[in-house]
Image (spheres, rainbow, N blue to C red):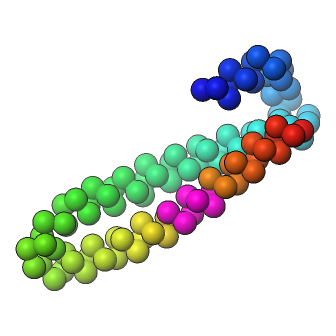
Amino acid sequence: MTGVLNLFASGRAQQLQDPLGSRWSIVLGLGIVLAFALYILVRRTVVPWTERMLMLGPKAAAGDAAAAAEAGQIVKRLQMIGRVQLVIGALIILAMVIARLS
């Protein structure tokens, strides 16, 4: 929210009318696209897998070997997605720093 306020307070909002007109608008647009991609990634992968883990947890705790095996696979997927999220988040921060220094 503060980024949007800063965009209008600094007077740079007009630069977004020509998205390829300056390095600042390109990098800012890239950061926005990455932020939306990160949101979609979380909604499409992490949320369903977390819900599935909540259903498998009691079964695995009760001794169901199949549920425990599936839970282990989901944990590995979530760890991989977590790494991807960190990389995308780092790219977003890098894009915002570059935009700030432009």
| 8 vs 37, nearest the viewer | 8
Residue farthest to the left, as pictured = 62
- Determine whether 9 is above or below 34 in the image: above
Q: Main secondary structure of the magenta part?
A: helix
Q: Position of residue 67 (x, y in %)?
A: 19, 75
Q: Is residue 45 left or right of residue 1?
A: left
- Determine whether 57 is above or below 33 in the image: below
Q: Position of residue 83 (x, y in %)?
A: 55, 66
- Residue at x 82%, y 37% (from the top left corner): 100
Q: Position of residue 101 (x, y in %)?
A: 87, 40
Asked whether residue 85 is drawn in magenta, I would say yes
Asked whether residue 93 is drawn in magenta, I would say no
- Residue at x 70%, y 48% (from the top left corner): 93
- Determine whether 81 is above or below 25 in the image: below
- Residue at x 34%, y 70% (from the top left corner): 74
Magenta residues, start to end: 82-88
Where, by quadrant of the figure, is residue 85 drawn? bottom right
Res. 25 visible in picture:
yes
